[in-house]
Amino acid sequence: MSGAVQAGYAPPTGPDAPAPTRRRRWLLAATVAWALLLGVLAWISVRDDPPSVREQRSLGEAGPVVDRAVGELAAAAGGTVVWELTPARVDRGCRITPFADGATLTRGVDVAVPEGGERELLERIADRLPAGWRAGVRTTPDGLRLRADVGEFVALDGRPGEDGWVRLTVRTGCRLVGAGYAPTTGPAGAETVALADALRALGQPGPATPELVSAPCPGGGVARTARAAEAAAGSTDPAAALAPLATGGPVLDTPGAYAYRTGPVTVLADARAEHPRLTATHPCPTP
């Protein structure tokens, strides 16, 4: 019999025939073990490591970062200009992934500025912000901008408005809602008393509980703004009614808007149609 092998006929493997089966079993076992190891490491990482991208941080986790940034802005604005804390806004409906909805948190500080003083104001505020934020003022195709990186994937943007105000805004971008945003709270102070006095001077009843917006100051203490929306709408000349309450003359007196100080509190009446309001703001403590 010749040793030729017929075409299409596999020669016998002899006593080593089971080897391929054993190798497949070992490969399967090794693959399963490796998958289990990766799963354990991923679980430990999720449990112990801080999030590394913004999508992993919920709105509740980002809230304190935003609040502290607003406090930094309040301190940077200082006590020589008219400013107020704006109410926090949570907008739902953005998409983190095609399968996950999210929300954005926006807070800010509005600062009054005379025409032509926008760049000087923005640069002064930028210089007073933490160095790690790398705040800078630039002229962009969209106009003058202050931009800074607060950290934790939170951004700061400052820009002049068309109504004599510079708006400083802190935003999170789209986040998982998680436990939701719990705003900074604190006891009301002299700002609520000043707001009630101003409302009486304008001939309007004060709200039982005015809207109170606050932020933690970097050196301790809390900045607060008490707000009565629409309260100034019926007063075309707030200066006439409020001037007797000022302890040192007006700090802002323009058509439709009037601001004065009583002690450390700045009271603002803005009767313009865009957003009539009466606010009283207590600044951060002076170092």
Image (cartoon, rainbow, N blue to C red):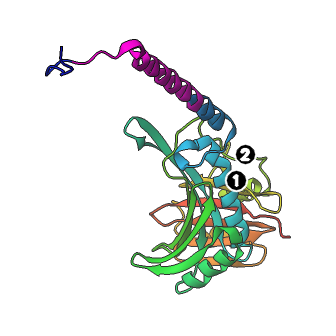
Residue 221 in percent (x, y) is at 82, 57
Residue type, mark 1 in image: Ser
Residue 88, relative to residue 166: is it above or below? above
Residue farthest to the front?
Answer: 1
Kindly report the distance in space between the C-alpha atoms of the residues bearing marks 1 and 2.
Answer: 6 Å
Specify the label residue 63 is tagged with: none
Residue 153 as seen in the image, left or right of residue 23: right
Tag 1 near tag 2, CB within 8 Å: yes
Residue 130, relative to residue 58: is it above or below? below
Q: In the rendered image, which quarter contains the C terminus? A: bottom right
Task: Specify the segment rendered in magenta.
Answer: 10-38
Whether the magenta-drawn stretch holds residue 281 is answered as no
For label 1, the residue is 214
Residue count near mark 2 (Cα–Cα under 10 Å), binned few <14, some 14–19, many ≥20: few
Residue type, mark 2 in image: Thr
Residue count near mark 1 (Cα–Cα under 10 Å), binned few <14, some 14–19, many ≥20: many
For label 2, the residue is 185
Q: In the rendered image, which quarter contains the N terminus? A: top left
